Image: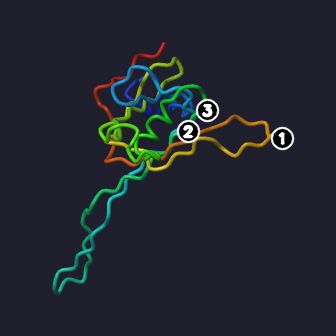
Amino acid sequence: MTKQQPFSVNMARFDPYKTYRFLVYFDTSTTPVAGVTKVGALKRTNEVINHMGGGDAVIRKGLGRMKYEPITLEAGVTFDETFSAWADAAQVLDKGAPITSLRSLRKEIRIELLNEQGQPVLRYLVHRAWVSEYQALPDLDGSANAIAIQHIKLEHEGWERDLSLTEPAEV
């Protein structure tokens, strides 16, 4: 019987990381966004370019443009105005002007996956994200037993793994 290879660079670790331990940061903030309960998947797709040369019976496949899917963030409704302030950056009020400058419309996002000890082990950087959809409140139902959740949908110009983060040794 052969020994299985571990999933990560930590040679003592054999289990994959859990999806319920993570933090989200906006721009250069050192404080995570309060109450984030869910982050949608980071997904990208390459278009395929089919090419067939004259007299060639084989269709060649080439690499086309990259497409990044929107990311949805969900958070419990709290007094923290981080979600609503960003979502309102593009909203035009009855005075006819945006609430804030267009400079605050796009943000860099950091998503960190944590190990069981709460230490960051993976970090992804999302570039030039902006809010394309905002839900301030869910359906309100007096007979329900649920937490009020708000969500934002982020369009962005790509993401990458931050390779400068190295995994801490587990204890």
**Badge 2 or badge 1: first in the primary sequence:** 2
At x 46%, y 24%, the residue is 32
Q: Which residue is mark 1?
A: 143
The quarter of the picture where residue 7 lies is top left
> Local crowd at mark 3 within 10 Å, few (<14), some, or many (≥20)?
some
Q: CA distance from mark 1 to mark 3?
A: 19 Å
> Label 3 is placed on what type of residue?
Gly
At x 40%, y 24%, the residue is 10
Q: Are marks 2 and 1 in contact (CB under 8 Å)?
A: no
Give residue 50's position: percent from left, percent from top: 27, 74
Q: Which residue is mark 2?
A: 74
Q: CA distance from mark 3 to mark 2?
A: 7 Å
> Local crowd at mark 2 within 10 Å, few (<14), some, or many (≥20)?
some
Front position in the image: 38 or 144: 144
Give residue 139's position: percent from left, percent from top: 70, 46
Q: Are marks 3 and 2 in contact (CB under 8 Å)?
A: no
Residue 76 is marked as 3
Q: Are marks 1 and 3 in contact (CB under 8 Å)?
A: no
> Label 1 is placed on what type of residue?
Ser
At x 49%, y 24%, the residue is 115
> Label 2 is placed on what type of residue?
Glu
